[in-house]
Image (cartoon, rainbow, N blue to C red):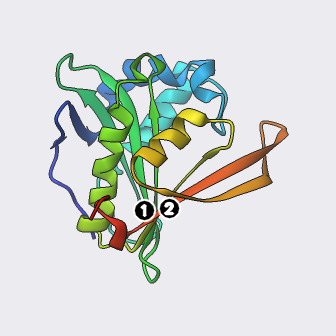
Amino acid sequence: MLRPEFPIRTARLDLRPFTMADLAQVHAYQSRADVARYLYWEPRSAAEVEAALARRLTRDRLTREGDCLSLAVRRLDTGDLIGELNLDWLSEPNRSGEIGFIFHPDQHGNGFATEAATELLRLGFAGLGLHRIIARCDARNAASAGVMARLGMRREAHLRHSEIVKGRWADTLIYAMLDTEWPPGT
């Protein structure tokens, strides 16, 4: 079980559970075509963001396999909500999980995704005791693949035509890290 103390603070960011007060700032990036381009959903309306946000409100802990921890990412200097993180507990017996992240395009190139996702890996390995954490992205999403590489995750697979997304075949990249490789450089 993992129930983090919030907020989780990094050098430049606070990570915390979502609230309904986050609606406008989440809509600001989830409504963008350039954000939804590599995701399973199309740009979201305010009502769709509200419904998605409502599902995240109770995702502040991992108590059993299948649970998802969903966190808002806020800049300390501006107070702006700039993205979101997920840590999914995939298997208790196999001690495996998956991380994911979405950031507002205006924040790309500043290292925020890497800084925030580093905390997800720490939570998964040190907090939950996971052995293996994966991350996946559409193979065309070079920015996400770059974050995974900078995290020290190893590219393990390029799955060709692995699923149909938005009516067309998509390739998937899979990255992974083991607890023995955490933290990177040890």
Percent coordinates x, y for residue 175 in the rendering: 54, 56
**In the rendered image, which quarter is residue 42 located in?**
top right
Amino acid at pointer 1: Asp
Q: Which residue is mark 1?
A: 67
The image position of residue 140, as x and y in percent, is 68, 36
Q: Quadrant of the N terminus?
A: bottom left
Name which quarter of the figure residue 9 lies in.
top left
Give whichever of 34, 167 is nearer the camera: 34
Kindly identify the residue that appears in the image at 59 percent across and 35 percent down.
Answer: 142
Residue 120 visible in the current orientation: yes
Q: Position of residue 117 (x, y in %)?
A: 35, 45
Would residue 125 be found to the left or right of residue 161 on screen? left
Mark 2 or mark 1, which is nearer the start of the sequence?
1
The residue most toward the right is 168
Q: Residues within 10 Å of mark 2 (few under 14, many from 20)?
A: many
Q: Is residue 73 left or right of residue 135?
A: left
- Residue pointed to by mark 2: 176
